Image (spheres, helix red, strand yellow):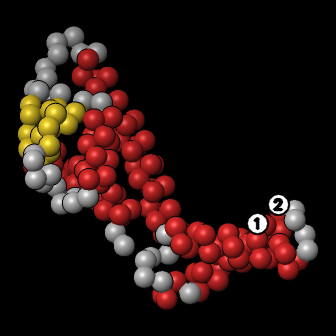
Amino acid sequence: MAFQILLNVIIAVTWMFLSVSFKPTTFIVGYLLGLFMLFLLRKSFSSRFYLDQVWAVIKLIILFFKELTLSNISVLLLIIKPKMQIRPAIFAMPTVLEKDWEITLLSSLITLTPGTMVIAISDDNKTLYIHTLDLDDVDEAIDSIRDTFEKAILEVSRS
């Protein structure tokens, strides 16, 4: 990814020198031309096209803010009830993530979402122990995390 971005900037700067114009608009035109050329040559790179990864990061950020909003609303609804009927629980969630930064990101996203917190990670980094404020079904909670955060992190990190 970094190589493709650098190559795109080099193409944009080369375009500026060939155009003998050093305005920001010339750089943008050169960058877009370089982007188009890199898109046409994307099969010749060993990694995937870098805009795919940028788009996956944007989708992960949007997903986090969506989940943050929904969980804030659900926690708010729990605490404004006259009789608080919560079922706190701790459950183990196996993960398919392998890299340390992926597991750290997943743990952070879970912890930053109100009502849940990662309290421990197993020594082999294959299981997260999660505390939740209100739990109906363990399998449903695990599937929810897998279908949202874990899937989005895999999309960002896959080559």
The numbered mark at residue 79 is none
Q: Position of residue 122 (x, y in %)?
A: 10, 46
Q: Position of residue 18 (x, y in %)?
A: 85, 80
Residue reaching furthest right? Answer: 20
Hey, what amino acid is under mark 2?
Pro
Q: Residue at x 69, y 73 (%)?
A: 10
| Side of 77 where 90 appears, left or right | left
**Residue 147 shows in the view:** no
Q: Position of residue 87 (x, y in %)?
A: 10, 26
Hey, what amino acid is under mark 1?
Ile
**Residue 108 shows in the view:** yes
Residue reaching furthest top? Answer: 82
Between 12 and 144, the one nearer to me in the picture: 12
Q: Residue at x 88, y 77 (%)?
A: 19
| Side of 152 where 118 appears, left or right | left
Residues at marks 2 and 1, CA–CA distance in whole angstroms = 6 Å
The C terminus, quarter of image: bottom left
Circles 2 and 1, Cβ within 8 Å, touching? The answer is yes
| Side of 54 where 24 appears, left or right | right
Q: Quadrant of residue 76?
A: top left
* Mark 1, secondary structure of its residue: helix
Q: Residue at x 78, y 67 (%)?
A: 27
Counting other residues with Cα less than 10 Å from the Cα at mark 1, is it few (<14), some (14-19), or many (20 or more)? some
The numbered mark at residue 28 is 1
Q: Position of residue 94 (x, y in %)?
A: 11, 53
Q: Residue at x 83, y 64 (%)?
A: 25
* Mark 2, secondary structure of its residue: helix
Which residue carries the number 2 mark? Answer: 24
